Image (spheres, rainbow, N blue to C red):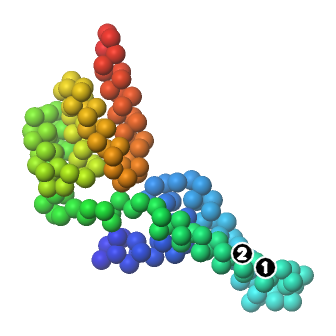
Amino acid sequence: MGWTGLAGRLSYLWPGLLRLWYDGHVPSLFGAVAFAALLNALVLATFVYPGGPWSSWRGYGWVVLVACWMMGIWHAFRAPVPWSVHPQTREQQDLLIRAQAEYLRGHWVEAQSLLEQLLQRNPRDIEARLLLASVFRRSRRIELSRRQLRRLCDYEEALWWRFEVERELRLLDETSAPGA
C-alpha cells in the first residue's frame, strides 16, 4: 500500500505530522512535540499518578488536548497534499527518470522531448514542469523558462515546490542579467 496508503492517511491524525513529514515544516515539529508532551503528561497524571497535586487540572488538560487534536486534523485536511492530486503511473515515473538522466548528461533536446511527452499526459506534473523550466534556462531560452514558471504558479500543488521555483527565478535573473 505504501506511505500514501494507510500510513499516509494516519499522518493526518497526529497534529503537525503531515506537514512535518512531507514539507519539513519546522513549526509543525514544535506542534507535534508539544502535542506529544501534553499527551504524555496527561496520561501520567490520569493513570500513573491520579492523586497528584495536578489532579484538579487534569480535566482541563484533556479538553485542551482534544481541542488541539481536532485543530490539527482540520489543518491537515486543509493542506494541499502532493500525492493526492495526480498520482503518476509507472510509465510517467519512467519518463521522468529518463528525462532527469538526459538533463544530468546535458542533453537538453532529449530531456525537453521527454518532459513534453510527460506534460502531454499530465499537464499538472509539477516536477516535470520545473525540470522543463530548468532545461529552458540551461539552453538559454529564458522566456520559455519564465513561461513554465508562471504556469507553475497557477497550480496550488506548486506551493510545495516554492523554494525551488524561487531559486529557478533567481537563476533566471542571473542568467538574463547583462554581462552574464
Q: What element carries label 1?
A: helix
- Say whether residue 132 is left or right of residue 177: left
In the figure, residue 3 lies in which quadrant?
bottom left
Cα separation, mark 1 vs mark 2, equals 6 Å
Task: Give me the residue at 32% from left, 73% from top.
Answer: 2
The relative height of residue 138 versus residue 178 in the rendered view (above or below) is below
Q: Would you name the residue on which mark 2 appears?
A: 64
Rendering coords of residue 18 (x, y %): 48, 65
| 67 relative to 46, above or below | above
The residue at which mark 1 appears reads as 60
Q: Do the residues labelled 1 and 2 touch (CB within 8 Å)?
A: yes
Q: Which amino acid does label 1 sit on?
A: Tyr
**Residue 40's quadrant in the figure?**
bottom right
Q: Pick the quarter of the image with the N terminus.
A: bottom left
Identify the amino acid type marked 2.
Val
State the residue at coordinates (78%, 84%).
59
Closer to the camera in the image, 40 or 159? 159
Residue at 23%, 47% in the rendered image: 128
Q: Which residue is drawn at 76% across and 87% down?
A: 46
Name the element at disc 2. Answer: helix
Q: Where is residue 37 in the image (x, y as percent from the top left)?
A: 69, 70
